[in-house]
Image (cartoon, rainbow, N blue to C red):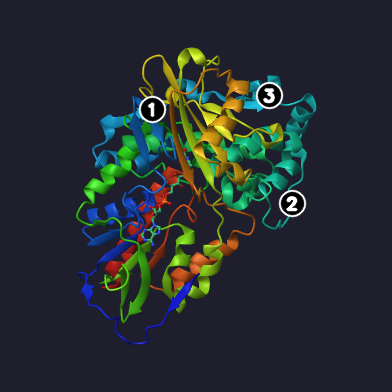
Amino acid sequence: MSATVDRRGAQPPYEIERGEPRSVAVIGAGITGLVAAYELKRQGVPVTLYEATGQAGGSIGTSLADGFLAEHGPNSFVSSASVETLIEQLGLDDDVVEANADANRRYVVRNGKLVPFPMTPLAMLRTPLLSKRAKLRVLFEPLVRGVRDAEDESVASFVRRRLGPEVLDYAVNPFVAAIFASDPEQLSMLHAFPRVYALEKQYGSLSRGLMKSRQAAIAARKEARLASDQGDHGDQGHNQPSGEHDPRMISAAPVSARLISFRDGLQSLTDALAQALANTLKLNTPVRLLHREKERWVVETGHDGAQRARAVNAIVLAAPAHALTAMELPAAIRQYALPIEQVEYPPVSCLTLGFRRSDVAHPLDGFGVLVPAVEKRNILGALFSSTLFPDRAPDDHVTITVFVGGGRQPGIARAHTDELVKLVRTDLRDLLGVRGDPVFAKHVYWSRGIPQYSVGYDKVKSAADATEASNPGLYLTGNYRHGVSVGDCIASGQQVAQKVAAWLAHSS
Ligand SMILES: Cc1cc2nc3c(=O)[nH]c(=O)nc-3n(C[C@H](O)[C@H](O)[C@H](O)COP(=O)(O)OP(=O)(O)OC[C@H]3O[C@@H](n4cnc5c(N)ncnc54)[C@H](O)[C@@H]3O)c2cc1C
């Protein structure tokens, strides 16, 4: 139930701590909130970071047991100039691990068999993943007319129109499942893949647009190299907020981008941020109420007699969209909140299984395998996680990380571990020739996984814009607003911190 707070001058029944001048509260210690708080602290802004749970990191978490490393959410992400800067600031350079060169090979299932996804135009012509007819359809893509003044269109409709139904089924559907755990019929092309969407608008064709934008990127890189030789060090790796910089995407990542993790897993990054914020991070402290008191914001935490309140100048709300429902908010926020609260986050289960190497027939020589919906399997896909990065399994063992559920099959995500292992093993046996019992299993269930940038997402973005415009000093950020990949979240944490710091400087 959502609630509106209206104090109209009445004082709360407890004392409000006065934050220092120019102080900021960041709500939610996922990667976005951690980075925002870290950047504000670095700029000398007094900051308090509130986290509802007992651990910082949000969707990012790693566990290590019996020599098997399991990621609870993301397994890797695409680096950028801003990510590299953060890593350097945190002193994590020596802990970074780059994905194995084999990671360039991604398999897709067709008729129950693994087929390497074609990564070059020549490979596309030769691949058994698409029929001759589908390949011809792709070759004719430049002749397909663009739609004028198209309404927000689903990814499925866009791809069917430009590239044909088979490309949708075997190339796009599995990648959309991997990035957003979503169904392309629901996902908005404009909001989920804005750069690809813009290619049609700008060049009238994806292939023409890709060619031109590659040429432009090469020219820009040359120019940047020249500029850096001359001492100009601008941020050349600024993220485009979308699914396009997600490591599970194949083609749109910048050519020079690194696919990375850390020796002890992705939690090294969030742990390092939490450590740097030690005095300012309040764990087990859900924010339950925000209200305005003259020129400042008041953030309330706790319940019944144990409430605490702190007055601050600005708030960065970096909690998931659905967190607004549980908060008491002033009418000036509540009036815009509904479309934000209604963003869907379908459930997803991550299951990391460890096997003896001799029990797996497939060489696991790639990033992993993606499963199109038309193949009617239980899993969305499987990462070859011990191939991707070194030392993720004991000698003579491997790990395979499987994703289940999402918008495609939400019911399966909710299965109990034993049932899930059974369902997953059927697919692993058929697809990868996995025979023996797993010697390790780590199951993490996300009741709300990844936000869906569904058709009509304009409403969500407009509501977030309107909330900020009517509430000076309040900033909304996180993966439902500026892109779902870890790289996008890092960039949006840094950007919101810059905005807040500039606003504080201007308003004081
Ligand atoms: C299963 C899975 C696999 C993924 N794989 C990849 C991948 O391989 N690569 C990639 O780049 N991305 C991947 N992603 C996406 C990426 O991990 C997330 O988009 C990103 O980590 C989200 O960060 P965030 O800070 O925006 O939100 P979150 O991580 O959701 O953090 C929000 C935080 O806010 C806290 N909070 C909520 N309410 C309150 C409150 N009232 N008060 C205080 N705190 C509150 C929550 O407890 C949480 O810690 C994956 C995501 C999932 C779920």
Residue occupied by mark 2: 147
Give the mark, 3 or 2, whose residue is nearer the N terminus.
3
Q: Residue furthest right?
A: 133
Q: Which element is circle 2 on?
A: loop
Front: mark 3 or 2: 3
**Cβ of mark 1 under 8 A from ligand 1:** no
Q: Which mark is residue 404?
A: none
Disc 3 crowd rating (10 Å Cα; few below 14, some 14-19, many 20+) is some
Determine the secondary structure under disc 3.
loop
Dividing the picture into quadrants, the one containing residue 80 is: top left
What amino acid type should be assigned to the residue bearing mark 2? Val
**Residue, disc 3:** 112
Percent of width and height locating residue 400: 48, 26
Image coordinates of residue 35 in percent, x first then y, are: 33, 50
Determine the CA span between mark 1 and mark 2. 41 Å
Q: Do labels 3 and 2 touch, CB within 8 Å?
A: no
Instruction: Give percent across and percent down for residue 176.
Output: 60, 41
Q: Is residue 231 visible?
A: no
Q: Amino acid at mark 1?
A: Glu
